Amino acid sequence: MSEKVTALDLPMADLSEGTKAYFAKCEEKLGMVPNVLKAYAFDEKKLRAFTDMYNDLMLGESGLTKLEREMIAVAVSSVNHCYYCLTAHGAAVRQLSGDPALGEMMVMNYRAADLTPKQTAMLDFAVKLTERPDLIVEADRQALRDHGFTNRDIWDIASTAAFFNMSNRVAAATDMRPNAEYHSLAR
Amino acid sequence: MSEKVTALDLPMADLSEGTKAYFAKCEEKLGMVPNVLKAYAFDEKKLRAFTDMYNDLMLGESGLTKLEREMIAVAVSSVNHCYYCLTAHGAAVRQLSGDPALGEMMVMNYRAADLTPKQTAMLDFAVKLTERPDLIVEADRQALRDHGFTNRDIWDIASTAAFFNMSNRVAAATDMRPNAEYHSLAR
Amino acid sequence: MSEKVTALDLPMADLSEGTKAYFAKCEEKLGMVPNVLKAYAFDEKKLRAFTDMYNDLMLGESGLTKLEREMIAVAVSSVNHCYYCLTAHGAAVRQLSGDPALGEMMVMNYRAADLTPKQTAMLDFAVKLTERPDLIVEADRQALRDHGFTNRDIWDIASTAAFFNMSNRVAAATDMRPNAEYHSLAR
Amino acid sequence: MSEKVTALDLPMADLSEGTKAYFAKCEEKLGMVPNVLKAYAFDEKKLRAFTDMYNDLMLGESGLTKLEREMIAVAVSSVNHCYYCLTAHGAAVRQLSGDPALGEMMVMNYRAADLTPKQTAMLDFAVKLTERPDLIVEADRQALRDHGFTNRDIWDIASTAAFFNMSNRVAAATDMRPNAEYHSLAR
Amino acid sequence: MSEKVTALDLPMADLSEGTKAYFAKCEEKLGMVPNVLKAYAFDEKKLRAFTDMYNDLMLGESGLTKLEREMIAVAVSSVNHCYYCLTAHGAAVRQLSGDPALGEMMVMNYRAADLTPKQTAMLDFAVKLTERPDLIVEADRQALRDHGFTNRDIWDIASTAAFFNMSNRVAAATDMRPNAEYHSLAR
Amino acid sequence: MSEKVTALDLPMADLSEGTKAYFAKCEEKLGMVPNVLKAYAFDEKKLRAFTDMYNDLMLGESGLTKLEREMIAVAVSSVNHCYYCLTAHGAAVRQLSGDPALGEMMVMNYRAADLTPKQTAMLDFAVKLTERPDLIVEADRQALRDHGFTNRDIWDIASTAAFFNMSNRVAAATDMRPNAEYHSLAR
């Protein structure tokens, strides 16, 4: 844990037992503590708020599969050219899909991927919400419903896309560095 | 609580005692339950994740004043033309500053306001991070340090700007409606 | 009339009797002389050219109501983030409509307002003409006709949107300050 | 006067003696009545307001030469890709300068022209005001002063650039057609 | 051949007999050696690669007429505001069409021209490919097929538009100056 | 060679002995024939023009290393979100540098890489030339010279960036698919 994870280099807090256990679990399950967690670890309250929201959004119950949520994460991060999120979540798409090329397409241009019309509509909405949130109108929501998404699904698409518009910017503002392990994962 | 707060109109969950108490406290202190809370109330876990992050960010300890954090919120929301956030946080700037015109300037164009160079630098960073996060480099962080901001302050500027890039998009995607009370507040 | 109305601070000309009478009428009817008039008053010829065009456009005969013309003014000024025009014409929308929230929606994002499809088409045209005038083609005009607008109405929509693209830029270039009275008007 | 000058094709009003004389003077001096005048001639009040403003701005007293004002007109119209104004005012630059290539450079990209630093600063300001009026701050005005422009000159640069942002949009919205004579003028 | 054709002013290589003959043929047929050829003449290999690609693309066999290929060249160069290419290829459109105004419309805004729907579709594709290549999807190709273009025609539209996106940038980066002769050609 | 390499699916020409030998050499050296070559192989003249230009540019003599030229290729393709070029040239950066993360940074955001100021200046120029070629002025060239680049180097930076602005668009317009082999190369 000695390497610099952001350009701000804020000193890590004395971690509580709970956080230590959480990091140990990350090491065990992922083989690493994702650097974004170390970046937030200068303040346990901020760390917990971040992980609570993240875990609910990406791992909680939803009409969207975990892979679909990761696809949204990467398509949004591609618009914002976020090195951290493209690296970490590009790897997640490769892993969850077992399709390395799909991860690359999400990183580079999701329009190159051979998706279902429903998934394309989902990513089109996420990307429009990213590029021009001011232009979203009822017709955009209706287009999602017409592809079979429920209102709750729309909430999940929107809040996932929105979340990565946040974390892309935290990463960009602080020059957050992804763990080196991601690069070779699931290639 | 009968009015529609988003176009998704997700049915409110049976609220726990804790949430009921929280909403009652909002009523007491603000004279209303902000609609964003009702919007998230279809799922208490999501509501709590949102309020934990929000309260820490906007009300917690920071080198930035609460007014400065609200100014960031509004300047970011102005770029994204977010009706909900401009309404609610524009009111907050008017209240905290006691200067109705300042709230309007944040909503319309923060460059019209007569701010200190340090505050201008803070908003310039927040707005660049909003418009083109991919362009942020070390020189942008250094410019903030040169104005006297610490690395921790930079984290707070960045995470506040980033948070509103998230909530602007949740609001836009769901057509979230602000409480009518905000419009006449602190005019 | 002692306060600085623009950053250029051009000395006001010796006003003719006609102009004095016009300013007195403004005071009487509006309770103030709008600062834009003082800004032009360094040269009576320029002042008269401006007011002749403005009065014809905003107060003259038209198939558009005065409120609709003010809505165009504000929607255009929102794209251009013009502090002066958003302040002055936002107030006009509030006054003419008797609906403070409508004024705010025009300032923040007209797409949030519950307008008729015809009014939405009108503002969509005005905003496209503002953002990308080079993209306007016959189909855009036809869309307005399909909503019931005549060719003369299209002229009025176009010339109102165009006028505020001019005055937004005069105000931005000179840092024109709106009269303080506007802020609390019709809230 | 039989050809269609705009897509709206509004019937020309019965012209007053004054307007007839004005048009006759145009024919005499320019060899044509510029189509923009015919476009406005459906309503003499609008025509007069337009010509009063135009004539004061482009032909009246100013610290800017007539050529410089025309250069601003064309550089602004190039950003907006306005066929009418580029044709008519490109011809004016060719005529006033006696330099056909200069007219072409203003139409295509003013940065290709070998201008004085002062003239470049003037056009840079006009173009920034056109592309992103919200970004103009005191430093932009000061840059003009540093090149020797007075505050009154800045007004003239600003109001000329602003005027063409208006007329570009009237022309675009109505598909205004320039007189064929312009194309071969001063080549 | 003494004038400076680019800001880089790279010394012309000792030309081979083949190149000398090619330049002589240009002089004979066009009355000049186009400056782009002189710009590349510092290295004959680069010159040959450029002319081979150019001649095949613009003069070789294709379902597109030479005029249509030149129209694409100019419409693309208009987006990129390329002084060299607008000058040289604007002249080519005037010459090949015998319609000086058509050349001007391509330079200024192709949407002002009275084209067939098929030609408009061709230029719409070329311009979208120029402005936002990442947005091209199968529907864009299908729109061309629906207007009667074959897959080979689509290749030619695409590769012509793409080529000028290259040469616009070589010209912009090096400040390439067009031959003075172009300005008065076919007016 | 049976898979579809573009959405246009143009039938491959009967290849000459020369081309067959060239493709065999590709197989031998790279383990594949890059799909871009197959895409052009419907017409040997076009194929040769493309490979002549490409080979001179990317493999010929230059003050830029082959790695630097590949870095330009990828940074440009990142702006244009070109799936084909990011895949093929991202692999080249990984191979030539022996640094898989560097390839990823070029694909995602070159500003995240720890480059020399000279290399950053090179990529800043290439990316500005990609995003806004119309804005390049002498100061941009001078900035490169100040970092030690010669005029010939500037030509090479410019023409490499320009070339990928072309090939990105050919690939986007035709939905060109990269060889699957690239994805796992040099990870």
Image: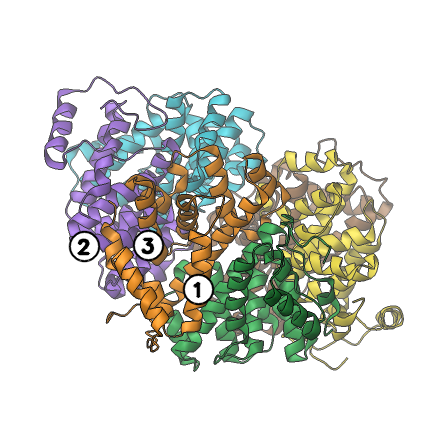
Chain colours: A yellow, B brown, C cyan, D purple, E orange, F green
D104 vs A4, left or right, is left
Q: Amino acid at mark 1?
A: Phe
Dot 2 crowding, Cα within 10 Å, few <14, some 14–19, many 20+? few
Most foreground residue, C22 or A30: A30
Mark 1, mark 3: which one is toward the viewer? 1
Q: Position of residue F126 (x, y in %)?
A: 49, 67
For the residue carrying disc 3, how many other residues have a C-alpha within 10 Å: few (<14), some (14-19), or many (20+)? many
- Give the CA distance from mark 3 to mark 2: 18 Å
Mark linked to residue E88 = 3
Please count the marks in the image: 3
Residue identifier under label 1: E50
What is the CA distance from the residue labelled 1 to the residue labelled 2?
32 Å
Question: Mark 3 or mark 2: which is in front?
Answer: 3
* Chain that bears disc 3: E
Which is nearer the N-term, disc 1 or disc 3? 1
Residue D93 appears in view: yes
Name the residue at 64% across, 78% down.
F96
Indicate the chain on which mark 1 is placed.
Answer: E
Q: Residue at (17%, 47%) from the top-left corner?
A: D186
Amino acid type, mark 2: Asp
Residue ID for mark 2: D99
